[in-house]
Image: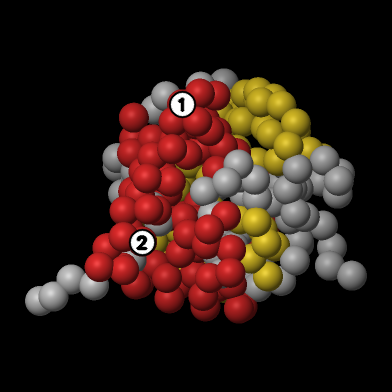
């Protein structure tokens, strides 16, 4: 089989960009979990954006993915992932598949990822990409993510990738004992990144600082106009 030199050069270029992204954007800001760093080196972020934006895929900023949604800044994806303190045998629920990038990062680390998307075009596009990249441990669902996925609960970790006006109790209820959840909570313009841990003594919260996400729309989020 003859290798396509153009494709090979593109692969080398994007791998270099990923390595640089990990060094400058993640390690330099305190991301130290080896599994998280390895995932960011492996997942081809440029495939999760449009062809026109591929050369910007490894920049230190979010990018539009259509439907008024975005793929988050690499650092915020890494910060949220690291905060979940994931283990290899974990089952993780993601609310808001979007581009699929966060789910792919999780899939590199844990046993199984369950991800829910309410926008059909993004649901179809991300599922197609997961199959193309052979992420067979990602289970997708087209639904209102704010209600969670009761049939597959409890989950070891839950990640919400859109800003919620409050912490949905229905998601807390779907956490396993010892489970962790991270989500942005606040108004429609800015939020605080909240980490929860559920144990025998109750729910423990930690504020990880300010952030800005698109709105979490659904029954237990913002109402769609």
Give the answer, above or below, for where 88 lies relative to 57.
Answer: above
Q: In the figure, residue 195 lies in which quadrant?
A: top right
The residue that mark 1 highlights is 27
User: What whole-number distance in Å separates the C-alpha atoms at marks 2 and 1?
Assistant: 24 Å
Residue 216, x across and y down, in percent: 74, 55
Give the answer, above or below, for where 210 lies relative to 91.
Answer: above
The one nearer the camera, 34 or 118, is 34
Determine the secondary structure under disc 2.
helix
Image quarter hosting the N terminus: bottom left
> Mark 2 or mark 1: which is in front?
2
For the residue carrying disc 1, how many other residues have a C-alpha within 10 Å: few (<14), some (14-19), or many (20+)? some
Residue 175, x across and y down, in percent: 52, 42
Mark 2–mark 1 CB contact (< 8 Å) = no
**Which disc is residue 10 wearing?**
2
Q: Residue at x 53, y 58 (%)?
A: 55
Q: Is residue 171 visible?
A: no
Q: In the figure, residue 11 lies in which quadrant?
A: bottom left
The figure's colour scheme reads secondary structure
Residue 152, x across and y down, in percent: 44, 58
Horizontal relation, residue 38 to residue 208: left or right: left
Image quarter hosting the C terminus: bottom right
The residue sitting at the right extreme is 225
Q: Is residue 98 visible?
A: yes
Q: Residue at x 44, y 31 (%)?
A: 23
Mark 2 or 1 closer to N-term? 2
Give the answer, above or below, for where 117 lies relative to 204.
Answer: below
């Amino acid at each position: 089989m003859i290798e396509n030199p153009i494709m090979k050069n593109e692969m080398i270029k994007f791998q270099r960009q990923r390595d640089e992204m990990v060094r400058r954007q993640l390690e330099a800001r305190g991301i130290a979990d080896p599994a998280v760093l390895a995932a960011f080196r492996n997942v081809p972020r440029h495939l999760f954006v449009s062809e026109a934006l591929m050369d910007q895929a490894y920049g230190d900023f979010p990018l539009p993915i259509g439907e008024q949604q975005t793929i988050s800044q690499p650092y915020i994806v890494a910060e949220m992932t690291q905060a979940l303190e994931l283990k290899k045998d974990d089952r993780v629920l993601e609310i808001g598949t979007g581009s699929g990038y966060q789910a792919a990062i999780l899939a590199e680390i844990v046993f199984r990822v369950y991800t829910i998307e309410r926008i059909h075009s993004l649901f179809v596009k991300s599922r197609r990409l997961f199959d193309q990249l052979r992420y067979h441990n990602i289970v997708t669902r087209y639904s209102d993510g704010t209600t969670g996925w009761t049939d597959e609960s409890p989950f070891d970790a839950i990640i919400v990738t859109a800003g919620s006006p409050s912490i949905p109790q229905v998601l807390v209820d779907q956490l396993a004992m010892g489970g962790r959840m991270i989500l942005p909570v606040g108004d429609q313009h800015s939020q605080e990144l909240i980490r929860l841990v559920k144990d025998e003594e109750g729910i423990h919260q930690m504020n990880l600082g300010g952030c800005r996400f698109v709105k979490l729309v659904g029954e237990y989020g913002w109402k769609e106009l």
